[in-house]
Amino acid sequence: MLDVIIVGGGPTGFVNALGLAQAGVSVHLIEAEPDIVKSPRAPVYHWSVLEGLDRLGVLDDCLGIGFKKQDYTYLVKKTGESIAYDLTVLEGRVQHPYNMHLGQHLMAGIVRRHLERFSNATVEFGQRFVGLDQDADGVTAHVEGEGGTRQLRAKWVIGADGAGSAVRKSLGLDFEGFTWPERFIATNLYYDFTQYGYARSTLMIDEEYGAIIAQIDRDGLWRCTYMEDASLPEEGVMERLPSFYSKILPHADDYKVDAVSPYRMHQRSAEKYRVGRVVLAGDAAHSTNPTGGLGLTSGLFDSYALIPALASVILEGADDEVLDRYSDARKDAFVNRASPQAARNKQLIYHANGGGQALAEALEMCRRMRDDKEFCFERLMFTKTLETPPLLSSHAA
């Protein structure tokens, strides 16, 4: 019998697989798609999650493809005001005083290559999870592929299969919260933003043309994420895209679209992240709008908490009550900190806080981040509060 089946081949699934395999746990990861999905997803890894990637031994490889990033700019579209701040205040205070930009599919691919070095880990693509049964000794996962439906048996299952998680649905868990009325459009494009004075991360504040613009690789590929009314037909996204670009890009005829990914946005959490021998992590457990990159951050912090806890249960006979503590701690971090902040971020960038006094107060806070280093440091420490301390005293370092 396997120790763990992991459902989902994104960053959260592969990070859990690698961490558990390194600990000596036998893992089998399944992914419904034929390969790692390459559609645009949040590409920013906050400084606070990089220590965990370093512990896993993958950070150097990630930085070899992605890049370090410290500079940020708020750009108020209507007035042209540009408010720049940076992460240099973290230097000498944290281990990695920078953020990292790297496509999620590239990061998952790097972790997959590290995982392939372990004989106690296997990966199968084109295998769709369709259901499970639990008993006192383990979990039987029902999996559908080219050869039909088969059963896989393991002591534990981790659901890391995204916001539409089949694992979560199989457990009958409510996905509590709401769906935003707008549609996000994540676009990858080749366009020389720096030529026009854009920072490598520019947060364009506007109630109609709000956008997050960020460089995502070393070869001139950028991400521009904007919003549209979700009542518009999704199949018309490409026809509407040039009109939006014309409003935010200087010389808007000089770009090349590489990829487009329209999707709905949620602020939702499963009612709990553990049911018996099944545990949820990442977007399968919780889903947020991506403004500020707090969904990816939360998923990685889920993994860093879950890996040692589950490994201790399997290998050391730790009380599995620690997984209930995992569920409680990670839900609290998401529901009470990550999700509200992501909603505030969206309100500022894409709605300009409704204008008036609310916008004026938000912009004053942005200026203070530029001018007051200690205030900037305090604000940057927010993402560290999303981390869960070790759940077992033997793993406190």
Image (tube, grey):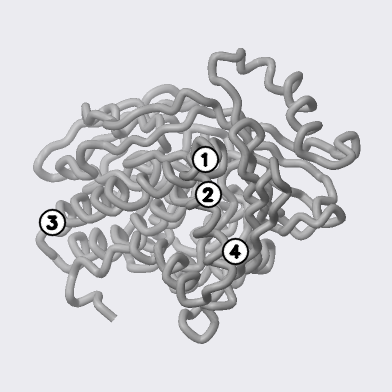
Quarter of image, res 44 = bottom right
Q: Nearer the viewer, residue 355 or 139?
A: 355
Q: Residue at x 52, y 74 (%)?
A: 372
Quarter of image, res 186 = top right
Circle 2 crowding by C-alpha within 10 Å: few under 14, some 14–19, many from 20: few
User: Spatial distance from mark 3 to mark 4, Cα to Cα?
Assistant: 34 Å
Sequence-first tag of 3 and 4: 4
Point out residue 262 in the picture as x, y percentages from the top left corner. Answer: 60, 28
User: Spatial distance from mark 3 to mark 1, Cα to Cα?
Assistant: 52 Å
| Disc 4 target residue | 100
SS of the residue under disc 4: strand
Sequence-first tag of 3 and 1: 3
| Disc 3 target residue | 320
Q: Residue at x 90, y 34 (%)?
A: 253
| Disc 2 target residue | 360
Q: Which mark is residue 356?
A: 1
User: Spatial distance from mark 1 to mark 2, Cα to Cα?
Assistant: 6 Å
Residue type (three-letter) at the residue carrying disc 3 = Asp
> Could you tell me if the residues under marks 4 and 2 are in contact, i.e. CB atoms within 8 Å?
no
Sequence-first tag of 4 and 2: 4
Whether residue 150 can be seen here: no
SS of the residue under disc 3: loop
Q: Nearer the viewer, residue 208 or 389?
A: 208
Q: Residue at x 58, y 59 (%)?
A: 110
